[in-house]
Amino acid sequence: MGPRIFMKSTIFLGADKALPAMLLFTVMLAGATPDATGEGVRFDYAHQAGWKEVHGDRQSPVALDSNNAMPDLDDDEDDSIKIVRTTRDAIVVDNSHTIQVNVLPGNFATIRGRRFQLQQFHFHTPAEHVIDGKRYPLELHLVYRAKNGRLAVIGVLFQKGAANPAFDAIMRRVVRAGQAEPMPEFDISPLLPADLSYFQYLGSLTTPPLTENAEWHVLSQPVTLSSAQLEDFHRYYTANSRDLQPLNGREVLYHRDAKR
């Protein structure tokens, strides 16, 4: 997990050429020098013990337990997640360790009263986080960044059920590894549950360089995708999730969506 930042390189282009130029820039970034967010890092999920990057004792993912999570009872601040579900152009790419969607500016979230800009989102199978002993078949990570550089990740779990139209739209645009494909006017709404109750803890990126101090907000209510859609994802990846990491005494909060 690592956000990909877009530079405004299309300022002199017409609207019909801006998205292709952004697509080209995205492909160029695939070979960029890796930074603190993990872009450009190559690694192998089958040999996680060989991930040599320096890290501390606040790693992700973790097992979340409803009985041990602290209820978020602070009435002095807005602890909710508000996601602006605007429709924006996006770019789908198979980056050799997941299917990732890079989004143009316009999608943002207000998390506990602070504004974060959506950078990208991607998928892991099986799910990386476990809730009350249950591991779901797929997990979505929405990677946000604040103006001060702080990372916040919203984790969304998927269970088998009704087909998900947004997931279909993404998978239809997956081409060969390393090649990006534009996805005009994409709406993230179907990827999110109506109930935005969440577990919160401080953790890390789940791919090298495993950078810490990322805020995790794992939604407790899953969304659905069909068995056929999961099989479609498994054509590309069947095991791209990091092993569970110890909590090491970290506090886990649980915030219940006020709308529920």
Image (cartoon, rainbow, N blue to C red):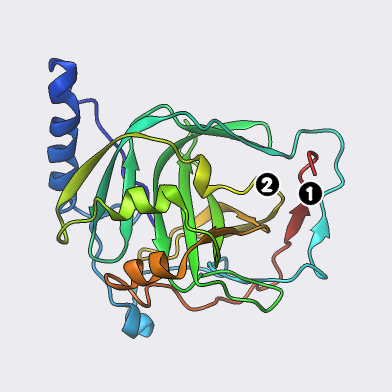
Residue at x-position 19% and y-position 53%: 33
Q: Is residue 222 left or right of residue 242?
A: right
Residue at x-position 19% and y-position 30%: 19
Residue 186: percent from left, percent from top: 37, 36
Residue at x-position 72% and y-position 50%: 197
Q: Residues within 10 Å of mark 1 (few under 14, many from 20)?
A: some
Q: Residues within 10 Å of mark 2 (few under 14, many from 20)?
A: many
Residue annotated with mark 1: 256
Secondary structure, mark 2, is loop
Location of residue 176 by image quarter: bottom left
Q: Amino acid under label 2?
A: Leu
Residue 80: percent from left, percent from top: 71, 39
Residue annotated with mark 2: 196
Question: Pointers 1 and 2 in contact (CB under 8 A)?
Answer: no
Q: Is residue 163 above or below residue 228?
A: above
Query: Can residue 72 be seen here?
Result: yes
Q: Is residue 232 left or right of residue 252?
A: left
Nearest to N terminus: mark 1 or mark 2: 2
